[in-house]
Image (cartoon, rainbow, N blue to C red):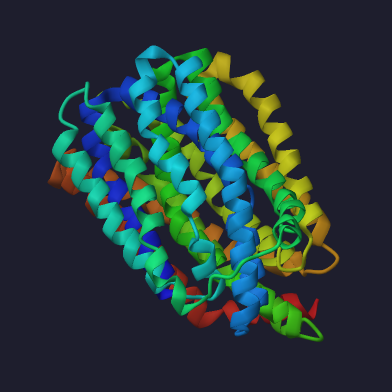
Amino acid sequence: MVWNTTYQVLSLLIPLLTIPYVSRVLGTDGVGVYSYTYSIANYFVLFATLGMAQYGVREIAKCGNNRERRSKVFCSAWAAQVLVSLPIVCVYVLYIIAFSNRDYIASSFLWLFWVVSSSLDISWLYFGVEEFAVPTVRSVITKLVGTFIIFVFCRTSNDLWAYVLGISLPFFLNALMLFPFLNQYVDFIRCPWAEIKRHFVPNLRLFAPVIAISLYSSFDKILLGLVSGMNEAGLFEYSDKVARMPLAVVTALGTVMLPHMTESMSCSSNGKESESLLQSSFEIMQFISLGLAFGIVAVAKPIADIYFGPGFGKCSIVLPIVAIMIPIIAASNVLGVQYMLPKNMDKQYTKSVVFGAIANILLCCLLLKPYGSIGAGIATVLTELTVLFVQGCYVKKQLNLYCMVVSALPYVIIGVLMLFLVAIFSPVFITYLGYSWVYLLSLILFGAFIYLCFSVLYYKTVRFLVIGVVREQ
């Protein structure tokens, strides 16, 4: 948990440093081109990896401490991954040559590092054996290399290539750096074709939700760039990115919990331990995600004006909208990733995100052209809500959803209280600090202090009473 959280915190801090710099250097159009080309490359990466990020973790976790079985599963699963990914890499190169916009061709080629890394990515092995130190340390190193490239070489609006390279290259380097440590966990063995091909069908089952999720996390950005222009795409890109950055920390718990819940559910006879663990995970994730969501809403305007800089003023409207998705995705992570996948409810999980993808396509067609980035924000929130609703329908008989919802309500009340107090004291901060970086940081710290104080007060006084009454009912 500590190692994975460390990596996710770094994933949060580096964009926090690069976004205000890049937004001022590249502007909304440059950020829009980045978002557009990234989203297209992302589809090729998804098809190259299929559902291996989750399937691989689950299959390795099932092996326990049996090294021979783990080696057999790893070698056959990775062989299947390579067989799928290499043709996808070739197709991506053909796409660049034949269909890529001439103005964006350099950026598209630089994303090739990321696409190629999809065939080499074996991080799922390390996550499956709950060894988070190795991938974390290497990810830290490669992300720092990428950050160095961005700050040193991205100097003008013509240096979009440097920004793309700083994001794409670390994926490739990180994948390469995982191989020297393989012999500590597996042995390379020759696998028959029958053993390799058995991974395709279950992997494809998990790929369906992955590609469905990508439809509403990338498709909207591509369509927004096409129908509303790169300026609107740039506005939504950074609003969406700021809202999703905290999710990296929140979903770190989900990544850690997947192998643990898989093992727990396979060993536990009554399931009470697993349900208790799930309930605790849900409350922790809602505590964090609701605080982050209300915090972003509270400081949306200074984030747009001070943090993003000139040209991003409209983000003060888009950002509060997309922030609503943070607790929704956190809840969906608990029900989907932490419960449905370990319980082998792959079909139900797939259906939930397929419903979300369909909803997103319809909403994008209705909202993007007339409302631009604001419409994209609304579509994103309603899509995530659709996914959560469908997942809730599938697990309502197995889980006490009422208890989960009630456990989150106090943090909603505390979040509203924080929002109210920040709005009241904001003019006071401006009077003494001016409309500056110091003002923005002070307002964030003030809001966090209020939220934490009231949360601790609730936890120390009435929480156990509330949960006890709900469980009795």
Q: In the image, is residue 283 above or below residue 297? A: below
Residue 112: image x %, image y %?
41, 35
Q: Is residue 68 left or right of residue 151?
A: right
Q: In the image, is residue 342 above or below residue 462? A: above
Q: Is residue 212 left or right of residue 161?
A: right
Residue 141 seen: yes
Q: Residue at x 34, y 52 (%)?
A: 173
| Quadrant of res 216 | top right
Front residue of 235/323: it is 235
Q: Is residue 88 left or right of residue 429?
A: right
Dividing the image into 4 quarters, which one contains the C terminus?
bottom right
Residue 299: image x %, image y %?
35, 44
Residue 132: image x %, image y %?
44, 72
Q: Residue at x 69, y 61 (%)?
A: 335
Front residue of 266/66: it is 66
Residue 189: image x %, image y %?
59, 70
Front residue of 144/443: it is 144
Q: In the image, is residue 257 above or below residue 90? A: below
Q: Residue at x 25, y 26 (%)?
A: 26
